[in-house]
Image: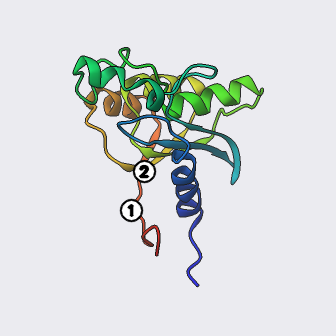
Amino acid sequence: MLRPSWEEYFMDITHLVAKRSTCLRRQVGAVVVKDRKILATGYNGAPARLEHCFDTGCLREKLGVPSGERHELCRGLHAEQNAIIQAAYHGVEINGATLYCTNHPCVICSKMIINAGIETIVYEEGYADALAKTMLKKSGIKLEKITRKVERGK
């Protein structure tokens, strides 16, 4: 039996969280962890009490907006945003925590992560957002791209 490292364990959980996504384009999960304890989770999708995109259709698809552009033209929140909001909503301090995410954060999420006091971001997939990478680097947040040793489903 292969026992996953802590990073692999929390990254596996991000993939489980991502399965709750209601986005038609991409399923993203985020988990905020401190001292090996899960503080909050989030996935991408429409705000609470609003119809999901899989019910209404994708606004971005309808408008022909390419991936990674014009984030404001979307009904959904990003996984990182939802995780930070859930922590705030429930009064959970995330200053000094690590954010595990299936994808590298966009620039909007990066700004929220910086101000939330997240110290480390562990992610799997890249994201073509040079400004996000620059801002995170200048803020002193540690970025760690993880390559999974054990493939999912095996």
Residue linked to disc 2:
144
Residue 2: quadrant of the picture: bottom right
**In this view of the protein, which residue sits in the foreground, 22 or 69?**
22
- Residue 153 in view (yes/no): yes
Q: Quadrant of the N terminus?
A: bottom right
Residue lying furthest front: 55
Residue 71, position as x, y percentages in the image: 35, 20
In-image side of 148 versus 88 (left or right): left
> Under tag 1, what secondary structure?
loop
What color scheme is it? Answer: rainbow
> What is the x, y in percent for residue 128?
25, 36
With respect to residue 89, does 3 lie above or below?
below
Tag 2 secondary structure: strand
Q: Residue at x 28, y 28 (%)?
A: 68
Residue that appears at 39% across and 26% down = 57
Residue 150: give x, y in percent of width and height. Answer: 45, 72
Instruction: Kindly identify the residue that appears in the image at 52 percent across and 56 percent down.
Output: 11
Q: Which amino acid does label 1 sit on?
A: Thr
Q: How many marks?
A: 2
Mark 1 is surrounded, within 10 Å at the Cα level, by few (under 14), some (14 to 19) or many (20 or more) other residues, namely few
> Residue 114 location, x and y as percent?
51, 27
- Name the residue carrying label 1: 147
